[in-house]
Image: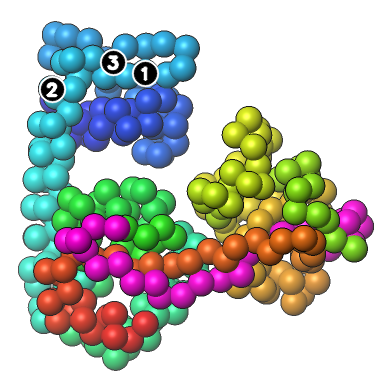
C-alpha cells in the first residue's frame, strides 16, 4: 500500500467515476483501475460497489477512507514542512483557481517577489472544491477561489469580481443584435466552469448536455476561434482577443449575467503569519 494508491482511492471515492478520477489525477483510466485493484487485493476486500451510475464505497471502503485521508495528509504536511526550511525568513503556500491565477495572481506574485525577496512562495492551481479541501487539511495558507466558504474558523474576503460575457468567434455573424437570456441554452456552448449555482441552473436546465466541456477557462479560448461555438467567460480573460478582433461579445438581452466573484480564504490562525499578512495587504 502506497500513497499514490491511496490518493487514487480518495479521488475515486469523491468523484465516484473512474474516468473523472483519471482526468483529475492526470493519469490513464487503466492506471486508476490497476491501483484500486492492487488496494483491494492487499486489503482482501472489495472497496467499491460498481454500478451503471458509477461506483460507491463499500463498508470496507468507508473504513479505509478515514485512515487514507490521515496518511495522505501526514505525507503532504511533512513535505510542506520540509519545503519551509531554508534561507528564507518566511514561507507561503497559495492555492488559486486557474482563472484567478491567469487574470490576477500571476501579476501579483511578480510584484510581491520583487518587494519581498526574503519570502518563498509556492502556488498550487486547481478548482475551487479541491482548493478548499486542501485548505481544510492545512495544506494551503491562503486559497483564492470563485466560491465563498462559510465557516467560523476561516476568514473569507471578496477580493474582486469580473463581468461575465457571452463570446464567440468574430467571424461568426449569428446573433449580432444580441440574444435573449432564455435562448442562451440553445447555443452550441463550451462549458468552462465559470457558471455556478443559481446562474447555472437558470441558464441551463439540469438535463442540458454540453458537447464540449473544458475545466480550465483559458483552454476554451482557442476552441472559439474559427468556429461557431460560444462560451461564457470573464471579460478580463478574453480582453486581448476582443481588442485584437479575434472574438466578439454577444449582448444578452432581458437580464445581465451575474459577475464571477473572487475570494481569499484562509484559516484564522494563518492570518497571524507575517508572510500571509504581507501578501494579503498588497492585493
Identify the residue at the far bottom of this view: 115
Q: Quadrant of residue 206?
A: top right
**Would residue 159 be counted in the magenta stretch?**
yes
Q: Which residues are magenta?
A: 150-176
Q: Is residue 4 left or right of residue 77?
A: right
Q: Which residue is mark 3?
A: 48
- Dot 2 falls on a residue whose secondary structure is helix
How far across and down, in percent of the image, does residue 148 sit? 37, 60
Dot 2 crowding, Cα within 10 Å, few <14, some 14–19, many 20+: few
Quadrant of the frame with the N terminus? top left
Are the residues at dot 1 and dot 3 in contact (C-beta closer than 8 Å)? yes
Q: CA distance from mark 3 to mark 2?
A: 12 Å
Q: Which residue is mark 2?
A: 63
How far across and down, in percent of the image, does residue 83 sit? 14, 63
Tell me if I can see residue 2 in this picture.
no
Residue sitting at x 83%, y 56%: 179
- Camera-side residue of 13 and 91: 13
Identify the residue at the far front of this view: 254
Quadrant of the frame with the C terminus? bottom left
Q: Quadrant of residue 40?
A: top left
Q: Is residue 254 left or right of residue 67?
A: right
Q: Which residue is mark 1?
A: 55
How far across and down, in percent of the image, does residue 100 sit? 46, 66
Q: CA distance from mark 1 to mark 2?
A: 16 Å
First in sequence, mark 1 or 2: give its number.
1
Tell me if I can see residue 151 in this picture.
yes
Residue 253 vs 63, above or below: the answer is below
- Dot 1 falls on a residue whose secondary structure is strand
Q: Is residue 23 left or right of residue 278?
A: right
Residue sitting at x 65%, y 42%: 204
How far across and down, in percent of the image, does residue 64 sit? 14, 24
Amino acid at each position: 500500500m502506497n500513497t499514490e494508491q491511496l490518493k487514487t482511492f480518495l479521488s475515486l471515492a469523491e468523484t465516484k467515476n473512474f474516468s473523472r478520477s483519471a482526468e483529475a489525477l492526470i493519469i490513464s483510466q487503466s492506471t486508476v483501475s490497476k491501483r484500486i485493484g492492487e488496494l483491494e487485493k492487499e486489503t482482501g476486500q472489495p472497496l467499491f460497489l460498481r454500478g451503471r451510475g458509477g461506483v460507491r464505497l463499500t463498508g470496507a471502503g468507508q473504513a479505509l477512507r478515514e485512515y487514507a485521508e490521515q496518511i495522505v495528509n501526514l505525507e503532504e504536511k511533512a513535505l510542506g514542512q520540509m519545503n519551509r526550511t531554508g534561507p528564507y525568513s518566511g514561507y507561503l503556500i497559495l492555492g488559486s483557481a486557474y482563472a484567478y491565477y491567469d487574470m490576477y495572481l500571476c501579476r501579483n506574485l511578480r510584484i510581491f517577489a520583487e518587494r519581498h525577496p526574503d519570502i518563498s512562495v509556492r502556488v498550487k492551481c486547481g478548482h475551487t472544491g479541491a482548493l478548499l479541501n486542501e485548505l481544510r487539511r492545512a495544506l494551503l495558507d491562503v486559497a483564492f477561489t470563485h466560491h465563498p466558504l462559510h465557516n467560523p474558523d476561516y476568514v473569507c474576503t471578496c477580493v474582486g469580481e469580473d463581468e461575465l460575457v457571452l463570446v464567440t468567434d468574430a467571424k461568426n455573424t449569428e446573433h449580432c443584435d444580441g440574444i435573449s437570456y432564455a435562448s442562451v441554452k440553445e447555443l452550441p456552448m463550451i462549458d468552462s466552469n465559470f457558471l455556478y449555482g443559481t446562474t447555472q441552473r437558470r441558464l441551463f436546465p439540469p438535463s442540458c448536455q454540453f458537447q464540449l466541456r473544458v475545466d480550465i477557462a483559458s483552454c476554451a479560448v482557442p476552441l472559439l476561434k474559427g468556429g461557431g461555438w460560444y462560451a461564457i467567460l470573464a471579460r478580463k480573460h478574453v480582453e486581448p482577443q476582443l481588442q485584437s478582433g479575434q472574438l466578439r461579445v454577444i449582448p444578452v438581452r432581458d437580464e445581465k449575467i451575474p459577475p464571477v466573484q473572487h475570494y481569499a480564504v484562509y484559516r484564522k490562525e494563518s492570518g497571524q503569519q507575517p508572510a500571509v499578512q504581507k501578501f494579503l495587504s498588497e492585493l
